[in-house]
């Protein structure tokens, strides 16, 4: 008979993160630029107290274990208090992306059966409009103080978050939940069909928080000052609010102030050392900083993910500002972290350009996630850096099922079941460095051969006249699909179609060079800041290639 370990088995609970932060990092600051316009200063001790008060307030509103508390909110201390107060007390925190269409928000809130909706004042007009359609929501809570409550509102019994907390003692013991209890729900963007819910557990969240803080992951210590630009409504700000409590670092929340100037002032004012966000947010910040000839005095490292980081952006952050860029890949279904581009000792001895090419990849998995690439028949493909296949994953913080859907999304690899298909196409090299070539639905199939839209975009983004670029498939009578490049020029840039096409020469195989370039004033983005290729394809479906 197996000998069992004789160790304590305390459940991995989100409340334990907060308890730890309160005791060991109590005075560490939590700074929030708020919707109200002020710069609010709090710390882990206060956040812990207010989270307990929030838990008591939700109970007083009648919430029962498992009930969903939804948020429509920016990054800020009140959002953090709801994260911990709801999850910690056995409720489920459902972060809704406010950039979705109102009909989608109504659908998601109904699907999740949200009982309470907490929202920032920014979204009051939106919530007033959709409130009658939010059939399951019994309480609407405005995340502000009494002084900022509106004199009147179309929402009957609109509650004030700070008032609800002030009515509670904070004398509250976090329940000893089963660590597999649901802690939060996040819906995928739903580019096709309705969004799907990923239901995280306390266990998956705590394990993800552990792993993502490690040196070869986000490398966060208690000496860091972290500004998550990635929203708390986008896969829990990539877990940073949880790693923050685990490690005890200072958090700086930008609220709704995400333009280049506001971000730069916050980075400097709070001496931010580390940040995280999708590529598009850095476009605005870098433009502002470059235009003003400014420098960062404390900013050292950033994680960029959610979409491929263009190498030109990475180079600029590294060379112009001395900022280390950690390229990361993940998805809502993975809490989200899967891989990060951090070099091994051996790789640090490679020539600089070889190192750079590795850093541009999406990187190696962290412990807790396993990956494989497979062909359409489920056979695994070699890790040779060249064979591209469907990327599948499994691990402690990967979903096994979607919310309210008993069908298993999982697939087999060489006959072994239990792998989640990511919908991405990737290569993996002998060192385990993974590179995404495309989302399977964005791949351009020209005469049976795949062309990576990410490669084409990365090259275009390296041209000094290009602000943003998207490569999509356009119909072609002979080749089925051919690449079409859609470009937003930088202000004042004079770059032409011919110049851009010539720019591809020598940088990519000739047959992969786009057939045409279209200049537009704006490229559509998804609610999470990624290029909306389906929409772009639809907008340009009648475009006739000159080669057609
Ligand atoms: P969101 O996270 O925006 O809600 P998804 O979870 O659907 O939406 O996004 C995950 C997808 O984003 C991945 O499957 C992949 O296609 C893409 N992605 C994420 N990070 C990267 C990256 N570093 N490079 C390329 N694609 C990425």
Image (tube, helix red, strand yellow):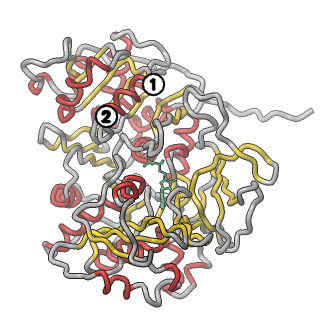
- Coordinates of residue 3 in the picture (x, y in percent): 86, 35
For this rendering, which residue is in front, 323 or 410? Answer: 410
- Is residue 192 depicted above or below 93 in this figure? below
In the image, what residue occupies the spot 38% across and 69% down?
544
Instruction: Label 2, secondary structure: give it.
Output: helix
Q: Are marks 2 and 1 in contact (CB under 8 Å)?
A: no
Q: Position of 80 compared to 389: left or right?
A: left
Q: Quadrant of residue 293?
A: bottom left
- Coordinates of residue 58 in the picture (x, y in percent): 35, 16
Instruction: Label 1, secondary structure: give it.
Output: helix
Location of the N terminus by quadrant is top right
Which numbered dot is residue 204?
none
Q: Exactly how many numbered labels are in the figure? A: 2
In the image, what residue occupies the spot 66% across and 32% down?
407
- Is residue 82 depicted above or below 191 in this figure? above
- What crowding class fits label 1: few (fewer than 14 Cα within 10 Å), some (14-19), or many (20 or more)? some
Q: Position of 370 compared to 236: left or right?
A: right
Residue 524 appears in view: yes
| N-terminal-most mark, 2 or 1 | 2
Label 2 C-beta lies within 8 Å of the nearest ligand 1 atom = no
Residue furthest out toward the bottom: 506
Q: Which residue is mark 2?
A: 79
Q: Quadrant of residue 267?
A: bottom left
Q: Of the residues tagged 2 and 1, which is closer to the observer?
A: 1
Q: Which residue is mark 1?
A: 111
- Is residue 1 depicted above or below 360 in this figure? above
For this rendering, which residue is in front, 254 or 166? Answer: 254
The Cα–Cα distance between marks 2 and 1, rounded to whole angstroms, is 22 Å
- Coordinates of residue 118 in the picture (x, y in percent): 29, 26
């Amino acid at each position: 008979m197996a000998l069992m370990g004789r160790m304590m088995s305390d459940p991995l609970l989100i409340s334990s993160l907060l308890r730890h932060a309160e005791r060991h990092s109590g005075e560490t600051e939590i700074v929030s630029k708020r919707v109200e316009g002020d710069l609010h200063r709090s710390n882990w001790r206060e956040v812990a107290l207010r989270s307990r008060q929030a838990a008591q307030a939700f109970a007083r509103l009648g919430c029962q274990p498992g009930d969903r508390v939804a948020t429509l909110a920016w990054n800020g201390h009140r959002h953090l208090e709801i994260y911990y107060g709801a999850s910690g007390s056995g409720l489920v925190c459902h972060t809704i992306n406010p950039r979705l269409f109102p009909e989608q928000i109504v659908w998601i809130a109904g699907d999740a059966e949200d009982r309470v909706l907490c929202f920032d004042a920014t979204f009051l007009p939106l919530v007033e409009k959709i409130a009658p359609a939010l059939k399951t929501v019994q309480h609407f809570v405005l995340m502000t103080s009494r002084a900022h409550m509106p004199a009147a509102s179309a929402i009957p019994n609109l509650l004030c978050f700070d008032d609800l907390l002030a009515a509670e003692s904070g004398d509250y013991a976090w329940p000893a939940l089963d660590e597999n209890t649901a802690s939060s729900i996040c819906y995928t963007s739903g580019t096709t069909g309705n969004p799907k819910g990923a239901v995280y557990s306390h266990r998956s969240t705590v394990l993800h928080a552990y792993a993502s803080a490690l040196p070869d992951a986000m490398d966060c210590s208690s000496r860091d000052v972290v500004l998550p630009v990635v929203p708390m409504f986008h896969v829990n700000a990539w877990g940073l609010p949880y790693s923050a409590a685990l490690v005890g670092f200072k958090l700086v929340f930008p609220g709704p102030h995400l333009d280049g100037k506001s971000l730069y002032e916050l980075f400097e004012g709070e001496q931010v050392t580390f940040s995280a966000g999708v590529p598009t947010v850095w476009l605005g910040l870098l433009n502002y900083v470059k235009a003003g000839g400014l420098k960062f005095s404390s900013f050292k490292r950033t994680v960029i993910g959610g979409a491929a980081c263009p190498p030109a952006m990475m180079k600029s952050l590294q060379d112009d500002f001395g900022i280390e860029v950690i390229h990361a890949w993940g998805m809502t279904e993975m809490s989200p972290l899967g891989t990060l581009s951090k070099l091994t000792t051996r790789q640090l001895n490679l020539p600089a350009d070889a190192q750079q090419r590795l850093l541009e990849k999406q990187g190696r998995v962290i412990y807790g996630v396993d990956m494989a690439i497979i062909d359409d028949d489920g056979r695994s493909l070699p890790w040779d850096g060249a064979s591209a296949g469907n990327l599948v994953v499994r691990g402690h913080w990967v979903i096994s099922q979607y919310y309210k859907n008993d069908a298993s999304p999982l697939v087999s690899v060489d006959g072994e079941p239990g792998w989640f298909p990511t919908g991405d196409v990737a290569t993996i090299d002998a060192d385990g460095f993974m590179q995404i070539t495309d989302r399977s639905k964005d791949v351009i199939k020209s005469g049976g051969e795949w062309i990576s839209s990410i490669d084409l975009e990365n090259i275009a983004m390296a041209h000094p006249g290009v602000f943003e670029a998207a490569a999509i498939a356009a119909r072609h009578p002979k080749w089925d699909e051919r690449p079409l490049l859609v470009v937003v020029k930088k202000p004042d840039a004079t770059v032409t179609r011919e110049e851009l096409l010539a720019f591809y020469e020598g940088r990519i195989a000739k047959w992969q060079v786009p057939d045409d370039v279209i200049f537009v004033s704006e490229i559509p983005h998804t609610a999470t800041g990624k290029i909306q290729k389906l929409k772009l394809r639809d907008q340009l479906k009648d475009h006739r290639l000159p080669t057609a």
